[in-house]
Image: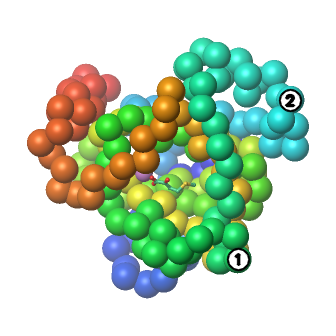
Amino acid sequence: GIEAWYMDSSDEDQRKPHRLNPNQPVSLQDLKNIGVFSWKLNADIYETDPELDQIRKDHGYSYTDIITIHKDTLPNYEEKLKMFFEEHLHLDDEIRYILDGQAYFDVRDKEDRWIRIAMSKGDLITLPAGIYHRFTLDETNYTKAMRLFVGEPVWKAYNRPADDFDIRHKYLASLQGS
Ligand code: KMT
Ligand code: NI
């Protein structure tokens, strides 16, 4: 399952864990409170998994594709990784299911602190539309992920600052009271 923690502020290699000392863990409930949800599935059977089918039905995730992030498989690898690590938001939820390898998703908490979410094989996560986030490989430099989407996918990312979008206001409003 996923593990999450608050990040240190060092500019060292983005692929390192960047834990605080002592470690400051972030629970699954903390993540839910900022609109981040996760599931643990059996990635060995993703092609026929009834649990995955149920999640897709429940949330209307009609679209899927698979992206393998490795220097030998991803066109414009360096450039894409650089883009993924720029702090950004999307107008739709970002839904990713790790089929192999591992990676980090970083998300901002309510006080604008970075939370690092360590994802490995079998972890499915949804980042809400309007949340500031970024993505990086870890030191293993490889992950294979399913991308899910409601309807035709829109990959457009808006780098921070992107505070004037309705979806950003909507996201911030959704945090009130949680
Ligand atoms: C994004 O928008 O942050 C991404 O698509 C991350 C890479 S997909 C595993
Ligand atoms: Ni994104």
43 vs 93, left or right, is: right
Q: Is residue 117 above or below residue 7?
A: above
Which residue is at a point 81% across and 37% down the rendered structure image?
A: 46
Which residue is at a point 18% across and 32% down the rendered structure image?
A: 166
Q: Residues within 10 Å of mark 1 (few under 14, many from 20)?
A: few
**Residue topped by disc 1:** 72
Q: Residues within 10 Å of mark 2 (few under 14, many from 20)?
A: few
| SS category of the residue bearing label 2 | loop
Which residue is at a point 65% across and 77% down the rendered structure image?
A: 71
Pick the residue in front: 55 or 146: 146
Q: What quarter of the picture does the C terminus occupy?
A: top left
98 vs 125, left or right, is: right
| SS category of the residue bearing label 1 | loop
**Residue topped by disc 2:** 48
Query: Of discs 1 and 2, which sits in the foreground?
Result: 1
Q: Is residue 102 above or below residue 111?
A: below
